[in-house]
Amino acid sequence: MNYVDDGYVIDDLLQLVRKANGERIIIHWIPDSASQQYLTPRVLNSIASYKEWLPKHFQNSGASIDVIREFRTDIFLKRNKQVGVQAYLVDDRGQEHVSDVLFG
């Protein structure tokens, strides 16, 4: 679990997605984006920490972060009211890769 500032980040994200009225909560990893003002300070602190770690993670995985044009995480409420999470990545060839993220 991601525990920051005396609380779990997932708890903040679940509250945000339920208040979003069907809109997606989007976390932009690459390129960096300032359009995340609606996120709580706890979530923003967590994102900042992960962004600092991200280049090292790619390097340790044998990949180059330089080939990524866009990387984001979308969090949303499904029709059945369950929370869905998808990761989107666009590489330097313009190819989009989408993956469902399971948590629980």
Image (cartoon, rainbow, N blue to C red):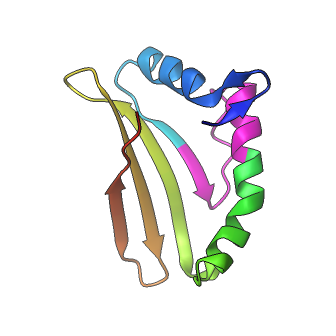
Vertical placement of residue 62 versus 68, above or below: below
Whether residue 40 appears in magenta in the rendering, the answer is yes
Residue sitting nearer the eye, 53 or 17? 53
Vertical placement of residue 5 versus 60, above or below: above
Q: Residue at x 74, y 60 (%)?
A: 53
Please state the horizontal and vertical placement of residue 66, each as a whole percent of the image: 63, 81
Vertical placement of residue 92 versus 97, above or below: below
Vertical placement of residue 66 versus 71, above or below: below
Q: Quadrant of residue 85?
A: top left
Q: Is residue 77 left or right of residue 58?
A: left
Q: Quadrant of residue 22?
A: top left
Magenta span covers which residues? 27-47
Q: Residue at x 20, y 25 (%)?
A: 79
Q: Residue at x 42, y 34 (%)?
A: 24
Q: Residue furthest left?
A: 80
Q: Is residue 71 left or right of residue 100?
A: right
Please state the horizontal and vertical placement of residue 48, each as a whole percent of the image: 76, 47
Please state the horizontal and vertical placement of residue 10, each as a whole percent of the image: 55, 29
Please state the horizontal and vertical placement of residue 57, each as a whole percent of the image: 66, 69
Q: Quadrant of residue 51?
A: bottom right
Say which quadrant the C terminus sits in. top left
Say which quadrant the N terminus sits in. top right
